[in-house]
Image: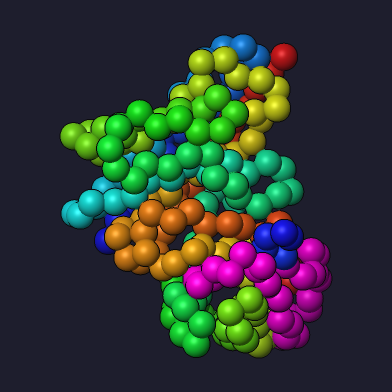
Amino acid sequence: AQSVTQLDSQVPVFEEAPVELRCNYSSSVSVYLFWYVQYPNQGLQLLLKYLSGSTLVKGINGFEAEFNKSQTSFHLRKPSVHISDTAEYFCAVTLNAGKSTFGDGTTLTVKP
Amino acid sequence: NAGVTQTPKFQVLKTGQSMTLQCAQDMNHNSMYWYRQDPGMGLRLIYYSASEGTTDKGEVPNGYNVSRLNKREFSLRLESAAPSQTSVYFCASSETWQGGYEQYFGPGTRLTVT
């Protein structure tokens, strides 16, 4: 079975600063990796996903993530955050056929 | 396209009452899911339907039942609500059951059981 660990439950950061949200996973087989964002009182929406190929994946709103197979990580980064990036972020893992496993979430708070 | 819709948005139940949460998607997706979200615990899968006509248990199915009414609709029923079922419930859909396909989420139903 696969598992996902988001290493930080809360990340406070000032506006225009860079941010990294960390995600590690464990699986004995190849996986697909996702980052979702949840704004207050809304459902989750896809930020980006890694299926294969280039390990650097670009998503919406200036976010990107890097897949590191040797470290089983898929960290999310943004070089300069905005107030509007304040949200909860979820890392998720899916096997070739089967259910997704979500991390517990990281709350990103961007302060002015 | 409305995407994934859920009704109701909010619900308060008393212990022992029953209710059905409704979910519909207009993206012609084959697979549909029900999750619950509790603070600090991420999303936990309750039930899923890989394709029309099939349903299977997820991680936390106890106390719930589901019906895949047709390709569009997937309902979640609480037969006898308990305070432990106080949560936010999300319905989601994806093109297929195979990995690599993103899930599309509804806006959620906030359920309180007193």
- Give whichever of A109, A81 is nearer the camera: A81
Q: Is residue A62 above or below residue B22?
A: above
Image quadrant of residue B113? bottom right
Residue A30 in the image: x percent, y percent? 23, 51
Q: Give the answer, above or below, for where A68 lies relative to B47.
A: above
- Position in image of residue A15 (x %, y %): 65, 14
How was this image coloured?
rainbow
| Quarter where residue B3 is shown | bottom right
Residue B29 vertical position relative to residue A76 in the rendered view, above or below: below
Segment tinted magenta in the rendering = B6-33
Residue placed furthest toward the top: A16
Residue A2 falls left or right of residue B81: left
Quarter of the image that includes the C terminus of chain A: top right
How many marks the image carries: the answer is 0
Residue A62, given in percent of the width and then of the height, sits at 55, 24
Asked whether B18 or B30 is in front, the reply is B30
- Magenta run includes residue B92: no
B15 magenta-colored: yes
On screen, residue A55 versus residue B49, left or right, reads left
Question: Can the viewer see residue A62?
Answer: yes
- Residue at the image point whose x is 71% and y is 81% from the top: B20
Q: Quadrant of the N terminus of chain A?
A: bottom left
The residue drawn where x is 22% and y is 37% is A69
In percent of the image, x 55 and y 65: which residue is there? B93
Task: Where is residue A32? Give x, y as percent.
Answer: 34, 49
Observer able to see residue B83 = no
